[in-house]
Amino acid sequence: MGDRAGDAVIDPQALERIEDAIYDVDPAAVIDFTPSTGRLRVAATLDSGHLATVLGFAGYPVGPDAIEQLPSICCGGCSG
């Protein structure tokens, strides 16, 4: 039994495949899944189209319109 995210079920193996696929493209990405909300949060250097492609390769196809892109709130103070 897995957790639900939209119409798809995210089981631990699926989440691991998603993480691996994203880390292959951006090793510094931060990924978080919240089962109670079904939200997968990704902080990465990917635009929504590229992220949708990576998720599709991981076996979790979504359209770019299903991805909510938020602006960075980085102040640049840590130079990171």
Image (cartoon, grey):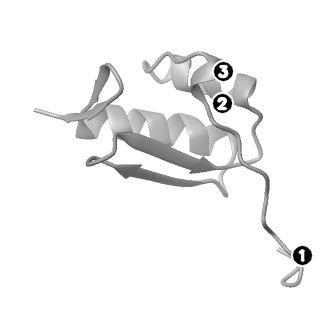
Residue 37 occupies which quadrant of the picture? top left
In this rendering, the answer to whether 32 lies above or below 55 is below
Give whichever of discs 2 and 3 has the lower sequence position. Answer: 2
Marks 2 and 3, how far apart in space? 8 Å
Marks 2 and 1, how far apart in space? 24 Å
Mark 2 and mark 3 residues within 8 Å of each other at the beta carbon: yes
Residue name at image x 59 percent, y 45 percent? 23
Which mark identifies residue 76? 1
Residue 12 occupies which quadrant of the picture? top left
Q: Is residue 40 left or right of residue 70?
A: left
Residue name at image x 32 percent, y 19 percent? 7
Which residue carries the number 3 mark? 64
Give whichever of discs 2 and 1 has the lower sequence position. Answer: 2
Q: Nearer the viewer, mark 2 or mark 3?
A: 3
Q: In this view, does 79 lie to the left or right of 29?
A: right
Residue 66 occupies which quadrant of the picture? top right
In this rendering, the answer to whether 7 lies above or below 17 is above
Marks 3 and 1, how far apart in space? 28 Å
Q: In this view, does 70 lie to the left or right of 13?
A: right
Q: Is mark 1 on a helix, strand or loop?
A: loop
